[in-house]
Amino acid sequence: MATMRELIDHPELATQDDINILKELIDNVHKFGESIKGYNVQIPSNNSIQRTAEVFYQEYLVMAAILEAFVNKDEIDFKEMNQSIFNYLPCELLNNPITFFQNLILKMMRIGYIQAIPTEDIYLPRFKLTEDGISALKNQTFHALASTSFFSKQTFEFNKKIRVSNYIMILITVLMLLITSYSVFLLF
């Protein structure tokens, strides 16, 4: 049996056994590739912890705003919901594309917090809270999640600053130790 290097350099010397072994190897590699297909996840983004915390904060704050839209009425239309959401949120969040807000409304419908009510005007649907939505509003669930995400993000940023200042303090301490040692050396 020839080695792989020999087969690459001189393929004409390959025996039928070598060809069969090579085919078996290729089949096994292919089978292995098929077996890990579910784990072969391509990660096209370079999300950081800070960015992830910011996205969670934004999503939870918008979800809280969606629930808050129902405080004064049991049913609202799409325009009332958007008006309530955009008046509730800080200006920085309004820089997100409109699809960001629409996707969160759809997400809240899919997970069962709000329900669409069929109307004749497909461009101006009506919504109402489900029992889970009422419970989440009463318990301030998304408000608490937004607050926690916000403070997690702030804590992460603060810890980065503290880490930098710690490195600077260590550097200053080492420099002071060197200067002190040099001074003591000059005295003797």
Image (cartoon, grey):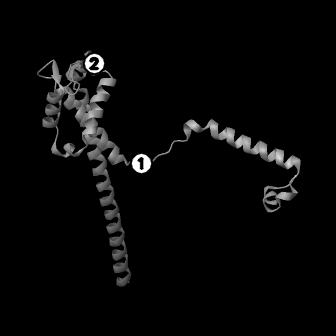
Q: Which amino acid type is marked by label 2?
A: Asp
Q: Nearer the viewer, residue 107 or 126?
A: 126
State the residue position of label 1.
45
Does 112 sit above or below residue 65? above
Residue sitting at 83 percent across and 44 percent down? Answer: 20
Looking at the image, is mark 2 or mark 1 nearer the viewer?
Answer: 1
> According to the image, label 2 marks what residue?
132
Q: Position of residue 37 (x, y in %)?
A: 58, 38
Please tell me which residue is depicted at 36% across the width and 69% down the height of the picture: 174
Query: 63 above or below 71?
Result: below
Q: Amino acid at mark 1?
A: Ser
Residue located at (16% from left, 22% from top): 76
**Which x, y percent locates residue 84?**
14, 31
Vertical placement of residue 175 versus 98, above or below = below
Give the image quarter of residue 115: top left
Helix, strand or loop for disc 2: helix
8 relative position to 108: left or right = right
Disc 2 + disc 1, Cβ < 8 Å: no
Work out which quarter of the rendered image holds the C terminus and state it: bottom left
- Is 53 positioned to the left or the right of 13 in the image? left
Where residue 141 appears, as percent x and y from the top left, is 25, 27
Q: Residue at x 37, y 74 (%)?
A: 178
